[in-house]
Image (cartoon, grey):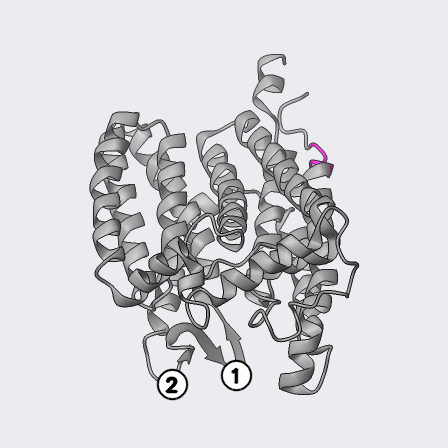
Amino acid sequence: MKNGEKKKADFLILLFPLGLTALGLLMIFSASAPYAKSQFGDIYFFIKDQMIAALIGIVAMMGVSFINYKLYKKFSWIIIAGGLVLLLLTFIPGIGVEHNDARRWISIGGFEFQPSELYKLALIIFLARVIVDFKEKDKPLAGYFTALAITLTSAVIIFMQPHMSAAIIIILIGFIIIYAGGTKIKYLILTIAPVAALAIVGAFTVDYMKTRIMAWLDPFAYPSDSGYQVIKSLYAIASGGLFGVGLGKSTQKFLYIPEPQNDFIFSIIAEELGYLGVFLVIALFCMLLWRGIRIAIFCEDLFGTLLATGITALIFVQAALNIAVVTGLIPNTGIPLPFFSAGGTSLVMFLTEIGILMNISKQPKKKERLTE
């Protein structure tokens, strides 16, 4: 390949997310119809918004795929500053919107969105920039502590909304990017240990966190409150069997699982499409992980590698944590399933991030550089 010659984008990094999005729209309609009918008198209430978000996301994805990813490094300070301002606006009365005792949304002109979804990408871009800059100055340890401080500060701000699941994801993604940037494992262990200790202490001292952990250990001891969702989720998964009860034929979505189109939509997938449907969903996420890692490995520069790593990790880690919650493997933290759970901001951002991966995949690759 000649210098500067453009490649076509990785077709599979486009195919798998579109498959997930299409399947997600189908399942959101199926899962949400009874709840939408009972609450709003319209079975299409949620699917209409999600389809609009999908169209916006696809347009954004295709547009972003033509923007050279290296520009994000140049404007990373503006991107992170903008993301931080949006996060802080959630705490301002009249701008920040509260739902279920959590102030995670901003309302502008009647349009609500979650700044934390935008901030995840902003943080990935900025952390990649910080690590690269300090490596170029031959100060990798300073870069590590700077990236760590930014990650933990961001997590604390988001936790205060409160939004525990997003804070957990921020910390995990931060550590993954820092490790991918070449930080020695001993430094990570020395940092992870006290952070984990603080998390454990907090889990058993903060009331709502303690309650969730106790319900996770024995959900049937809390059948009418903290353990209710998990119990109904397990019923749905068990009743699905190998082939499922059939698309649209779930019983647990009929006001048994609260708001089944959100965090627990995976249980409806298992009930209606069975273990084969579950395998298809997990396989699509694994294929997306494979292509994302491949793009990161063969990227020509460290910034692109870290950017691709962060985006890929964000999607896969969030999906893995959601499935773990729904199946009762970890405590319920309110983590949505990428491309499936209802939420326009989330879907638009995930598709936009795929567009960035597409652009990185179009650039000359390492092995091609070596063979020129």
Q: Which residues are magenta?
A: 7-11
Q: Against 260, is 175 above or below?
A: above
| Mark 2 or mark 1, earlier in chain | 2
Q: Amino acid at mark 1?
A: Gly
Q: Residue furthest right?
A: 246
Front one among 106 and 70: 106
From the top left corner, tell me how far across and down residue 278 is, in percent.
Answer: 67, 47
Count how many numbered circles sit on residues in the image.
Answer: 2
- Determine whether, in the image, residue 7 is placed left or right of residue 306: right
Secondary structure beneath label 2: loop
Which quadrant, please, contains the C terminus? top right
Q: Which mark is residue 109?
A: 1
Tell me which residue sits at (32%, 75%) in the image. Answer: 91
Front one among 123 and 189: 189
Q: Quadrant of residue 111?
A: bottom right
Circles 2 and 1: CB atoms closer than 8 Å: no
Mark 2 crowdedness (10 Å alpha carbons): few <14, some 14-19, many ≥20: few
From the top left corner, tell me how far across and down residue 103 is, in percent.
Answer: 38, 74
Q: Quadrant of residue 105?
A: bottom left
- Determine whether, in the image, residue 5 is placed left or right of residue 107: right
Measured Cα–Cα span from mark 2 to mark 1: 12 Å
Q: Amino acid at mark 2?
A: Gly
Front one among 217 and 318: 217
- Determine whether, in the image, residue 165 is placed left or right of residue 7: left
From the top left corner, tell me how far across and down residue 47 is, in percent.
Answer: 70, 71
Q: Against 9, is 171 above or below?
A: below
Tell me which residue sits at (48%, 29%) in the image. Answer: 301
User: Which mark's residue is nearer the viewer, 2 or 1?
Assistant: 2
Q: Which mark is residue 94?
A: 2
The answer to whether residue 245 is magenta is: no
From the top left corner, tell me how far across and down residue 218 is, in percent.
Answer: 40, 56
Secondary structure beneath label 1: loop
